[in-house]
Image (cartoon, rainbow, N blue to C red):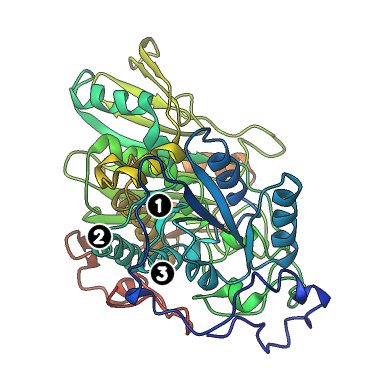
Amino acid sequence: MNATKSDSPLVSNPTTRRSFLKASLAAGAAVSFSAQSWAQVAGANERIRAGVIGFKGRGGDHISGLRGLTGSGVQIAALCDVDKDVLAGGVETFSKRGEAVKGYADLRRMLDDRDIDVVTIATPNHWHSLAAIWAVQAGKDVYVEKPVSHNVWEGRKLVEAARKYRRIVQTGTQSRSSQAIKEAVEWVRSRKLGKIVIARGLCYKPRGSIGKVPGFQTVPDHIDYHLWCGPAPMDPVRRAKLHYDWHWIWNYGNGDLGNQGIHQMDIARWFLGEQQLSSKVFSIGARLGYDDDGETANTQLVWHHYPSAPLIFEVRGLPAKTGAKEMDKYKGGSVAVIIECERGYVLIPNYSSATAYTHDGMEIKKWSGSTNHYENFINAVRSRKTSDLTADILEGHLSSALCHTGNISYRLGRKSSVNEMRERIQGLRGAEETLGRMVEHLQANGVSLTEHQLVLGDYLEMNPKTERFLNHREADALLTRHYRRPFVVPERV
């Protein structure tokens, strides 16, 4: 498995930075991860050596979060990034503090390092599951960012790998370490407001155009595009920015449903107490308000059927109205969860608080407070008890998969009139009302739904036990992907 740059003409020639950290960028034969059983379990007083994979964005928080665990015995011993400039800067920052840290461009070489006990993963989405599976096979414990997968199948494989190799695998959904939300969940489940009617997640978050550029973009010298793509197709770059804007490209990201929305989707499912995927799902949406290089929807609703109550999710990237800076609000929330019950509702506006209200807006009860998500992970690494995790990988898989199945419905849909949509979703609790508010929102942004129609996704039925759709080959095909060798998620972990 060669870690050198691809021969693709779209990738520029390597620069003199190739020699950077030559000693620490380990070479050698391919790793047989499944054969490695050398990892040591850190005792209560032993130092835990951590490696951070991908740290241009969210991984920076991993570094500061782990370094901030005073007295925890955690040492960041290695950094990994396919961007040599990012890697050099990270190593230099540690060096200036007098801290020794190894640098790796290829995560496989980091996983080969027996001095590393745990890894944290903050790569683009398409790398999450494979990197984590390889890590647990190499005997590492793992903290992996949300969504934990790029598709449903690989997320389940990650759960299987974590169990098989008895590794501690934490999902980066920090709200699960919120004492406030935990208490609110218990309060709602005790029927203080009666039964849950709808569990609703909101991602009303400003997302402007990423622009539209002609032709293909040249990958900078300092980025190994072969490694950046990994399991995904090594397609030409058709967007102005390689970094971050991958969120809006299907091969690498999952839209805001799988970016920000995974947090709120997870909280909503937590309140419902559901431990499997929904049996029915459909989605409506489109990318509207501008014409750019993005592919995912910037306006979307997803409806999941659960026996107790539907889980509805809403994505809006456009502002409240044309020219406005503020976003819409629903019952006081923009990026939030609203648990609508028979005698009131609970608003969860962030990861550390919740408030219960009557239907006319009178406050009933308030909760606040949260614990450290990284500390919870490290404590579980020491105890070796999966039950000590607030966000075990199974929770991450289920909530990520709810985002994926919603997107599958959308991707299989077709443009339709609003009247046709209303007819198709008639009788589904909360669906018509949610669509009505979506239409009003788009009209307020000057979007003509005659000229630019919404996409009505396929109404899909699933067997939650097998995590496969019923009699729908096209939908089943989107539960996984074609993996680019040698970056293949194994059938048998």
Name the kind of residue labelled 1 in the image: Asn
Tag nearer the camera, 3 or 1:
3
Q: Which mark is residue 274?
A: none
Categorize mark 1 by other alpha carbons within 10 Å: few (<14), some (14-19), many (20+): few
Residue that label 2 marks: 163
| Residue 486 higher or lower than 197, as above or below | below
**Residue 307 locus on image (x, y percent):** 16, 44
Residue that label 3 marks: 134
Look at the numbered discs 3 and 1 and tell me whether their residues touch, using CB distance below 8 Å: no
Cα distance between the residues tagged 3 and 2:
14 Å
- Say which element carries label 2: helix
Name the kind of residue labelled 2 in the image: Arg
Cα distance between the residues tagged 2 and 1:
48 Å
Residue that label 1 marks: 419
Earlier in the chain: of badge 3 and badge 2, it is 3
- Quadrant the C terminus occupies: bottom left
- Say which element carries label 1: helix
**Residue 429 locus on image (x, y percent):** 26, 40
**Residue 160 locus on image (x, y percent):** 26, 64
Earlier in the chain: of badge 3 and badge 1, it is 3
Task: Using the rendered image of the protein, determine whether residue 110 is visible from the camera's viewpoint.
Answer: yes
| Residue 273 higher or lower than 53, as above or below | above
